[in-house]
Image (spheres, rainbow, N blue to C red):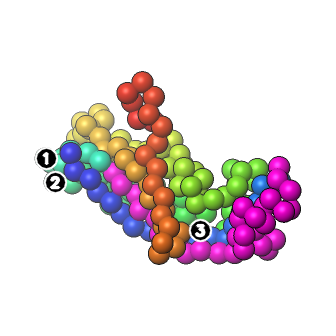
Amino acid sequence: MVYLTRRYRISAAHRLHNDALSADENARLYGKCNNPRGHGHDYGLEVTVAGEVDPRTGMVMDLGVLDALVEREVMSRLDHKHLNLDVENFRNRVPTTENLCIEIYNLLARDFPVWPAAPDGESGSGARLKRVRVEETRSNFFEYEGEVAAGKRS
């Protein structure tokens, strides 16, 4: 098993706020991150793929295929956005970096390509999405590896 990790940057704004809590609870829980206008981050994103090295190509996964997936599923939806206002899944969910990490994983996992494709058009042995890591600051980062159910990774 070989792990391939690719790095990306996402610039986005958010406000940590839960409508189910009082103004005092939100202020206490989220502090300055509860600013009504929000605040921004330049998030570091790492996407890790796991798989066997394809003997035909010598690669775990084609970086161009991975980059295209991240662009289509993540960057186009999240980069230079206000997460609370522009991203449907955060309209009613607090856009903490923990939740952002899970959201990115799920966006990638739902349409993760089978790679490599065998020369005859059949599916190859396949790399799989292993982990998403989101760095919020130099001091905070979060990792998510998906849900494990009945011994299988989603």
Front residue of 66/131: it is 131
* Residue 86 shows in this picture: no
* 145 on left or right of 93: left
Q: Position of residue 121 (x, y in %)?
A: 29, 37
Residue drawn at x 35%, y 43% as measured from the top left: 128
Highlighted range, magenta: 20-49
* 142 on left or right of 91: left
Q: Who comes first in sequence, dot 3 or dot 1? A: 1
The amino acid type, in three-letter code, at marker 2 is Gly
Q: Are marks 3 and 1 in contact (CB under 8 Å)?
A: no
Residue assigned mark 1: 55
Of badges 3 and 2, the one in the foreground is 3
Residues at marks 3 and 2, CA–CA distance in whole angstroms = 32 Å
Sort mark 2 into few (<14), some (14-19) or many (20+) by Cα contacts within 10 Å. few
Judge whether residue 40 is colored magenta. Answer: yes
Q: Is residue 80 above or below residue 48?
A: below
Q: Tell me the element at label 1.
A: loop
The amino acid type, in three-letter code, at marker 3 is Asp
Front residue of 80/25: it is 25
* 62 on left or right of 107: left
The amino acid type, in three-letter code, at marker 1 is Pro
Q: Tell me the element at label 3.
A: loop
Question: Which residue of the protein is positioned furthest toward the top in this rendering?
Answer: 150
Residue drawn at x 22%, y 50% as measured from the top left: 2
Q: Who comes first in sequence, dot 3 or dot 2? A: 2
